[in-house]
Amino acid sequence: MVVGGRWLTASLITGVVVGACTSSSDSSSPPDSRPSAAQSADEFMAAFNSGDFEDVSAALDTTVVQWSARKLRRWTNRRLPPGLVTAVEMERSGEPEETPGTADSVEVPYTITIESTATTEPASLSGAFQMSFDPDSDNWLAVWNESVLWPGIEGARRLDVVAKWPRRAPLL
């Protein structure tokens, strides 16, 4: 029975080692059981459209920059001055697509429409913003940066109106 006892001990040790090697230490949800990235994007954009900066800041990925509601409100008002900008609306323009090379990131196509007292027609810009999956909150979080307000316009920083008067005609 000594041989059998050694075999039993070796089998148990092997089973524990194999089980430890094959069990996932990653606590993130499998992609199939995750919440909808499209629904998370829609909720984020609805909060932004209504000016609910508490909900907007709660829906942001803070791994790079911490965004409090107050900081986000001030940042947005400096770039889209109230009075000059009469309305801003973000709308998803397609289904989120997985970012190549990672299952924890998607690109959400959207259109942002800005209405201003300086124009007769609203300006619509289209682009895509990133969302990353956060396993701790089990939710998709938007990656916020300046380019979200100005998709497709390289280096844009804020909305500003510049009036240019025509040159004065020569006096006779």
Image (cartoon, grey):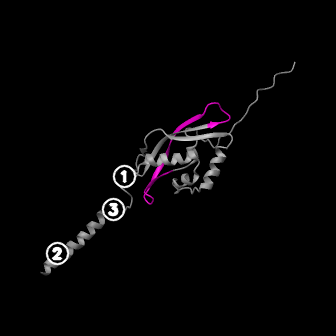
Distance (Cα) linking label 2 and label 1: 40 Å
Disc sitting over residue 109 in the figure: none
- Residue mark closest to the camera, 3 vs 1: 1
Above or below, comparing residue 54 to residue 117 in the picture: below
Q: Which amino acid type is shown beneath numbered disc 3?
A: Ser
Residue under numbered circle 2? 7
The N terminus lies in quadrant? bottom left
In depth, the one of 120 and 130 nearer the eye is: 120
Asked if labels 1 and 2 touch by Cβ distance under 8 angstroms, the answer is no
The picture places residue 114, in percent across and down from the top left corner, at 60, 38
Asked if labels 1 and 3 touch by Cβ distance under 8 angstroms, the answer is no
Q: Is residue 98 left or right of residue 171?
A: left
Q: Which amino acid type is shown beneath numbered disc 1?
A: Pro
The picture places residue 57, in percent across and down from the top left corner, at 55, 54
Residue 123 lies in magenta, yes or no?
yes
Disc sitting over residue 24 in the figure: 3
Disc sitting over residue 31 in the figure: 1
